Image: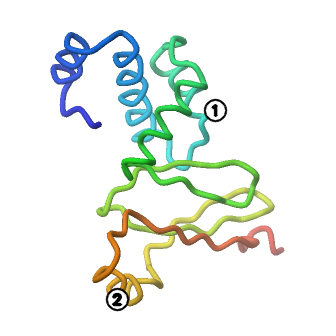
Amino acid sequence: MVFKSDNDFQMMKTTRSPHTVKTVKSVHAVLEALQQVNHATAQEITDWLSVSKRDNEISLTSVYRALNHLVGKAEVKPLNFNDGQVRYELNTQKMHHHHFVCTQCNHVQVVDVCPFEQILDTLRSTFLIQYHNFEVIGLCESCQN
């Protein structure tokens, strides 16, 4: 659930139970963090919230719950950069892209071309596609030298 303003968030707080308010607060905070920290792990999101928002009330567990909720709603995409961690980014059509990930220096380069457009066009007649992932894993030019 994305809130357009703090007013919407405040109204939701007054009409929901305390448990729901905590979940809504976590979802709102995670969305805000992902607007600032791209390709972030749950721990990196928690750290950003702690430092940037000075909010220690949102635990790592709450961040994971919010991320699971947002992934289920297809508002956030999980990413696998083959480094043993799940990373997350906002799922917006305006920013449709893929990634090249260097296994040595962990540099992530955005790839604006989608090699799946023709396949996706065919699948759209029978599937409601929420998102897809494509990551190229290897060594960047700097690490090859």
Above or below for 56 versus 138: above
What amino acid is at disc 1? Gln
Q: Which mark is residue 122?
A: 2
**Residue at position x 44%, y 68% from top?**
97
Residue at x 58%, y 56% (from the top left corner): 79
The quarter of the picture where residue 143 lies is bottom right
Does residue 13 sit above or below 44 in this rendering? above
Using the image, determine if residue 68 lies above or below residue 137.
above
Q: In this view, does 125 lie above or below 106?
A: below
- Give the x, y percent position of residue 121: 32, 85
Q: Name the residue under label 1.
A: 43
Query: For the residues carrying marks 1 and 2, which lies nearer the camera in this image?
Result: 2
- How many numbered callouts? 2
**Residue plotted at (76% across, 57% down):** 105
Name the one closer to the observer, 116 or 113.
116
Residue 95, given in percent of the width and then of the height, sits at 36, 61
Sequence-wise, which precedes: disc 1 or disc 2?
1
Q: Position of residue 47 (x, y in %)?
A: 60, 26
Residue 67, which numbered label? none
| Quarter of the C terminus within the rendering | bottom right
In front here: 3 or 17? 17
- Tell me, what colour scheme is on the image? rainbow
Q: Which of 81 and 37 is in front in this view?
A: 81
Left or right of residue 105: residue 78: left
Q: What element carries label 2?
A: helix
Percent of width and height locating residue 10:
21, 15
Amino acid of disc 2: Thr
Q: In this view, does 144 lie to the left or right of 52?
A: right
Label 2 Cα neighbours within 10 Å, binned few <14 / some 14-19 / many ≥20:
few
Judged from the image, the secondary structure of the residue bearing numbered disc 1 is helix
Alpha carbon separation for disc pair 1 and 2: 38 Å
